[in-house]
Image (cartoon, rainbow, N blue to C red):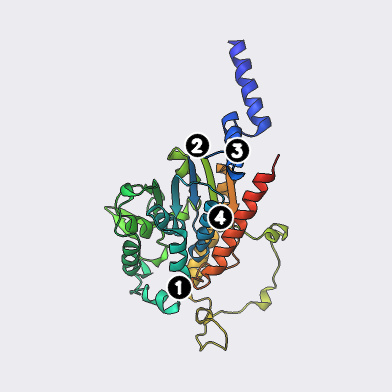
Amino acid sequence: MFRRLTIIITILCCVSLFGRPTNSINLHQKFKRVLKGEIKQDFTVGLALGAGAAKGFAHVGVLRALEEAGIRIDIIAGSSMGAVIGGGYASGLSVSELSDVALKSDWIDVLNLLDPVFPTRGFIDGEKIKTFLDELYEHKNIEDLNIPFAATTVDILNGNLYVIREGNLANAARASASVPIVFNPLSSEDLVLVDGGMIDPVPIDVVRSMDADFIIAVNVLAFPDDKEKEAPFQYLNGDDLKNSRSVWRLPKQNEAWYTMGKPNLAEIAHETVILSMALIAANQVELNKPDVLINVSTGLSAWNFLEAEIAINKGYDETRKVLENLKNQD
């Protein structure tokens, strides 16, 4: 009995000292050798694509960089925009095709996807977006995809996380991206389903449950590096505070249409949700510890769907940097 206890304590000490079990260390070495082109990938790589609305276009750049590095993605789980982009990639859309969808859209295309309704549960019905996604994904079901895929969604009534791994792909992505207040939620019997990013903005745990050997997580809600240097709070004078109202006006020269009256009610609701997700995501990646973490700070608002190129380039550059650092580690 004493001998067995000694062995257990020794194992625990080794794990504590070295940070990861031996098989994980071996996989990291293998991953680096794959990056260097020394061996072929003989283990499964799972990709957790996080929530972030327009920031999530960065996932397209991440996918491009991973492809160029010779990394094969075997499993994908996505939350919110991560489910939209990840579902598209799993359905067989190439990185170039995903880029074209993002980059060739103008403000008219964006407006055509919006179907405002009297806000009983959301400002936007979301049926046009679902129809668009269904055509983009060629009406595929999740179980028919070449890459195993999962989307997350949350029942707003009981706070439970649900993982969608079968059925219509567009419905799954639409449910996962149902930002509360902004979009009408989907439902299933007594469930009222909203954005999966509400409690699982970077679904590392879902990828792990799908038996991935090696997990790459992408957090597009990462705060800028200089954010950590800021004081935890700042001070204001109550005498300087006044009521705030949006003022709609014609855009100035060289000013984008979506800055008019900013922020409006829908944007405030959306950014409130995104800020909560960002804080959860920061803790989530720390607790779940993926094998590789790619933090992307796009500098864009979550509502800015017309600056996809910025987000894509940020995702690409950050991924290249992370992979290069891994290659050069001893």
Q: Residue 104 carries which label?
A: 1
Task: Tell me the SS state at disc 1.
Answer: loop
Number of residues whose C-alpha sits closer than 10 Å to that of mark 2, classed few (under 14), some (14–19) or many (20 or more): few
Closer mark to the observer between disc 4 and disc 3: 4
Q: How far apart are marks 3 and 1 (CA)?
A: 38 Å
Give the residue type at disc 1.
Lys
Foreground pick, 240 / 22: 22
In the image, residue 38 sits, relative to residue 126, either above or below, namely above
Residue drawn at the location 65% of the way across and 45% of the way down:
326
Residue drawn at the location 30% of the way across and 52% of the way down:
141
Q: In which quarter of the image is residue 172?
A: bottom left
Q: Residue 42 carries which label?
A: 2
Which badge, 2 or 1, comes first in the chain's sequence? 2
Q: Name the residue under label 3.
A: 28
Q: Residue 65 carries which label?
A: 4
Residue drawn at the location 54% of the way across and 46% of the way down:
216
Task: Tell me the SS state at disc 4.
Answer: helix
Foreground pick, 253 / 123: 253
**Count of numbered circles in the view:** 4
